[in-house]
Image: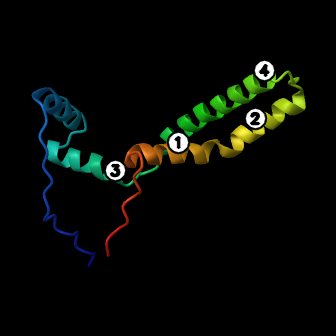
Amino acid sequence: MGKRPAFRTRTIAFRVTDADFDCLRSLAEASQQPLGEWCRDVVLEFAGQPTGTPAEQALLAEVIGLRTIVANLIFTFTSGSAVTADVMAGIVERADRTKVQRAIEVLRQLRIGPGQEPHAEKR
């Protein structure tokens, strides 16, 4: 026999405005789920991805990479240096090397809040 699923014994409740309720209910209906189950799934999915979804990471990494490239090019231009093919390749390589880790750090900070540390699991 398979393992029995754990019983759900704890409740989390929160209040919303009528407009928020209507929005959440519409989203749940579009997913063909009861509102409570849909809310639980969304919250647990969010909690399970403290560093964002792969799509969020990829998009933010590209924005961070482009920002890094633009900032380095502006610095190079304003310091009177020439932007040769080698200089440009180095700028792009540095941006590519750090963009994903920086995106993950930004997403993690956004999810846990400024100045907060992730909660350790209690055992």
Cα separation, mark 4 vs mark 3, equals: 46 Å
Q: Earlier in the sequence, mark 1 or mark 3?
A: 3
- Residue at which label 3 appears: 45
Amino acid type of the residue tagged 1 in the rendering: Gln
Query: Which residue is most to the front?
Result: 79
Question: In the depicted view, which residue is nearer to us: 112 or 47?
Answer: 112
- Residue at which label 2 appears: 92
Query: Which residue is depicted at the point 87% across and 24% down?
Result: 81
Query: Crowdedness of circle 4 by 10 Å Cα count: few (<14), some, many (20+)?
Result: few
Cα separation, mark 1 vs mark 2, equals: 18 Å
Cα separation, mark 3 vs mark 2, equals: 34 Å
Residue 76 is situated, as x and y percent measured from the top left of the image, at: 80, 26
Q: Nearer the viewer, mark 1 or mark 2?
A: 2
Residue 25 is situated, as x and y percent measured from the top left of the image, at: 16, 34
Query: Crowdedness of circle 1 by 10 Å Cα count: few (<14), some, many (20+)?
Result: many
Q: Earlier in the sequence, mark 1 or mark 2?
A: 1
Q: Is residue 2 above or below residue 115?
A: below
Quarter of the image that includes the C terminus: bottom left
Query: Crowdedness of circle 2 by 10 Å Cα count: few (<14), some, many (20+)?
Result: some
Q: Earlier in the sequence, mark 1 or mark 4?
A: 1
Residue 39 is situated, as x and y percent measured from the top left of the image, at: 21, 45
Q: Which mark is residue 78?
A: 4
To which quarter of the image does residue 84 belong? top right
To which quarter of the image does residue 60 belong? top right
- Residue at which label 1 appears: 57
Mark 3, secondary structure of its residue: helix
Q: Earlier in the sequence, mark 3 or mark 2?
A: 3
Cα separation, mark 4 vs mark 2, equals: 18 Å
